[in-house]
Image (cartoon, rainbow, N blue to C red):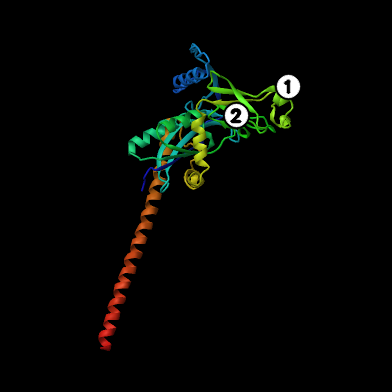
Amino acid sequence: MVDGKILYTDSTHLKANANKHKFIKKEITKSTKEYFDELENDINKNRINHNKKPLKKKTKIAETKEIKVSTTDPDSGYMVRDGKPKGFFYLDHRTVDGKYNIITDVHVTPGNINDVDPYVKRIETQIEKFNFNTKYLVADAGYSTNPICKQISDKNYQGVFGFRLGPHVKGKYTKYRFQYVKELDGYVCINNCFLKYRTTTREGYKEYLSNAEHCAYCKYKNNCLTSDKSINRTIRRHVWEDYKDQIFSFTKTEKGKSIYKRRKEKIERSFADSKELHGLRYCRMRGIKNVSEQCLLTAAVQNMKKIAMVLSHYFLCTLIQIYSKLTYIINIFRMLSHKRILA
């Protein structure tokens, strides 16, 4: 009933059993991303390929940030997202199988954790645990970051992600109106002018700059230049963006579209059932361990219902097949009996 070929992943928020006005402010240290060293190496390789000096290793200074900690449920996280309610929440990161929508993984985190942080580890955990032969990983645009795209591509999984436009100035041409030429490592604008490589930043972005003389007399400059003071256009491209381009190219194919289209029938339907039928909108208990228990029990109930429904369907189909075969045999006997009587 579970083949693991296509895995759909998403997260949903659960309102914590905590008052959003009762909290203390706490200073915490930002964690360093696991891929930081690999990114740093790729940045320097890219700079060397462009005859630039490699960047000196920067002394890692522990960065801190201020967060709100609930006095009622300290394990919960204060969530601030566009289009979402503000307050203390938990996140249920869930993965379902593409065959019968069986839930294969449940992972609970505080509400202030980014969706992409536990993604790759949770995928690896369930693939190793259940020995899946996974081919496609499906998620919405929130998961289409350059590090995620690189990590899953390196593990030979085909990502099927939603498209994210990224930061841009409203009313101005985005970077996707420019054509990237891989052989020349540069961009061509809408007026067929070339944007040359300038540098690779410490953050991992290659910068491409247009010629100010071309931009001065360009008929598209009002829609292209990002401000009135700008004299040329700069395009930024991540050193790992090729992986993202490959994923977006596949998502635009007929196969990719058909897989991504089923997200609403799979993971979104699974969360809808959890909230509408099993009360997963609210945490019934406090503490991440207890909330995980609630989410796991909800997933177990949904899986049992789904398994029962699928088996009942198979049982009904089997009965119909047996009935049709018996009817066929009885009709043959009747015909033979009728022929004997006539004889």
For disc 2, the marked residue is 187
> Given the current orientation, which residue lies at the most extreme bottom position?
343
For disc 1, the marked residue is 229
x, y (%) of residue 36? 46, 20
Q: Nearer the viewer, mark 1 or mark 2?
A: 2
From what the image shows, is residue 304 above or below residue 129? Answer: below
Nearest the eye: 325 or 108: 325
Residue pictured at 28% horizontal, 88% vertical: 342
User: In the rendered image, is residue 46 in sight?
Assistant: yes
Asked if the residue under mark 2 is in contact with the one under mark 1, i.e. CB atoms within 8 Å, the reply is: no
Estimate how packed mark 1 is, as few (under 14), some (14 to 19) or many (20 or more) residues with alpha carbons within 10 Å: few
| Relative to 51, 171 lies left or right | right
x, y (%) of residue 228? 74, 24
User: Regarding mark 2 in the picture, which secondary structure is present there?
Assistant: strand
Work out how far the residue at label 1 is from the one at label 2, CA to CA, in angstroms. Answer: 22 Å
Q: The residue under label 2 is which amino acid type?
A: Tyr
x, y (%) of residue 70? 52, 25
Mark 1 or mark 2: whose residue is earlier in sequence: 2
